[in-house]
């Protein structure tokens, strides 16, 4: 994580401990989505705190949040970054209606500040893509979604979405040659609908964006998907 090291807020008059722990947890989620922290990697509190420039106490609180979200799992070796979920189709089925609804709710609440923030994140993703900086491109993709959904003011739904993202195969999707350019175009379509203040159109654009990414994933990794469809019924005894 050294190449992504950041200095985070520390408790003081300007920020509560809960708020700053959320910032640390958010940064760690971005590191996992970006691939700076590997799936299956053991994380220690002291090394992680030193790497991201956060106090140990806040990092401990952030670990608790990531355990709750499913980004970290507890093992005999300690806290381990969660592996990819083989049942990705099920994650998609749960993600799709939640993210579409969050987009619909956020559309009328964004305002100029929110739209400008999303444009900036989208631009940063395109710039990272231009440099072929895949980790940062994936990180900015994640930020685009999460920042948008926060404007819906539904922390319960957002928490569930983050839990679903924890096991989704974004690591593999980033390596697909055509996917990142398509993501940038699809984000622009979402942004255009958001600028119009049209919840229905924004929801449709987000639905297409998520579903198209999944369809591309299936075309690139057919054997993995076939394995999922064979294994899942047996686990249910059908």
Image (cartoon, rainbow, N blue to C red):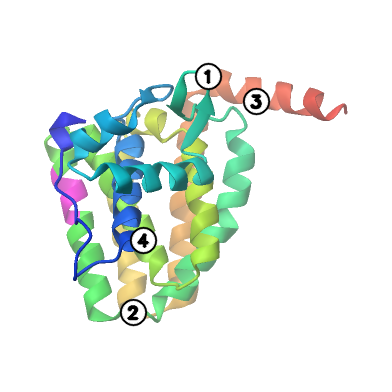
Q: CA separation, marks 1 and 2?
A: 52 Å
Q: Secondary structure at mark 3?
A: helix
Instruction: Give the numbered dot on residue 18.
Output: 4
Q: Which residue is mark 2?
A: 196
Name the front one of labels 4 and 2.
4
Q: Which residue is mark 3?
A: 228
Residue drawn at (29%, 81%), measured in percent from left and top?
A: 111
Which of the two discs, 4 and 2, labels the residue nearer the N terminus?
A: 4
Question: In the rendered view, would you say 121 is above or below 219?
Answer: below
Residue drawn at (38%, 72%), measured in percent from left and top?
A: 151
Which of the two discs, 2 and 3, labels the residue nearer the N terminus?
A: 2
Magenta-drawn stretch, dominant element (helix, strand or loop):
helix
Which of the two discs, 3 and 4, labels the residue nearer the N terminus?
A: 4
Instruction: Give the numbered dot on residue 60.
Output: none
Q: CA separation, marks 3 and 4?
A: 39 Å
Q: Secondary structure at mark 1?
A: loop
Instruction: Give the numbered dot on residue 76.
Output: 1
Which of the two discs, 4 and 1, labels the residue nearer the N terminus?
A: 4
Locate residue 25, reporting x and y percent: 35, 48
Residue drawn at (13%, 46%), measured in percent from left and top?
A: 127
Name the front one of labels 3 and 4.
4
> In the drawing, does residue 155 fall left or right of residue 109?
right
> In the drawing, does residue 125 fall left or right of residue 159?
left
Write down the region rendered in magenta. Answer: 123-127
């Amino acid at each position: 994580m050294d190449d992504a090291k950041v200095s985070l807020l520390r408790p003081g008059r300007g920020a509560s401990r809960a708020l700053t722990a959320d910032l640390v947890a958010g940064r760690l989620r971005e590191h996992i989505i970006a691939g700076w922290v590997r799936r299956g990697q053991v994380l220690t509190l002291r090394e992680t705190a030193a790497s991201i420039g956060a106090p140990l106490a806040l990092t401990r609180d952030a670990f608790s949040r990531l355990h709750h979200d499913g980004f970290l799992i507890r093992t005999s070796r300690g806290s381990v970054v969660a592996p990819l979920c083989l049942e990705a189709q099920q994650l998609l089925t749960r993600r799709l209606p939640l993210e579409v609804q969050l987009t619909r709710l956020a559309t009328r609440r964004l305002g100029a500040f929110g739209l400008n923030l999303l444009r900036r994140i989208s631009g940063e993703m395109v710039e990272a893509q231009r440099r072929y900086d895949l980790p940062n491109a994936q990180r900015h993709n994640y930020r685009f979604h999460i920042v948008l959904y926060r404007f819906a003011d539904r922390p319960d739904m957002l928490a569930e979405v983050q839990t679903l993202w924890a096991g989704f195969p974004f690591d593999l999707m980033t390596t697909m040659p055509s996917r990142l350019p398509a993501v940038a175009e699809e984000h622009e379509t979402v942004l255009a609908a958001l600028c119009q203040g049209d919840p229905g159109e924004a929801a449709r654009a987000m639905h297409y964006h998520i579903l198209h990414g999944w369809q591309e994933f299936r075309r690139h990794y057919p054997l993995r998907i076939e394995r999922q469809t064979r294994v899942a019924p047996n686990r249910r005894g059908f």
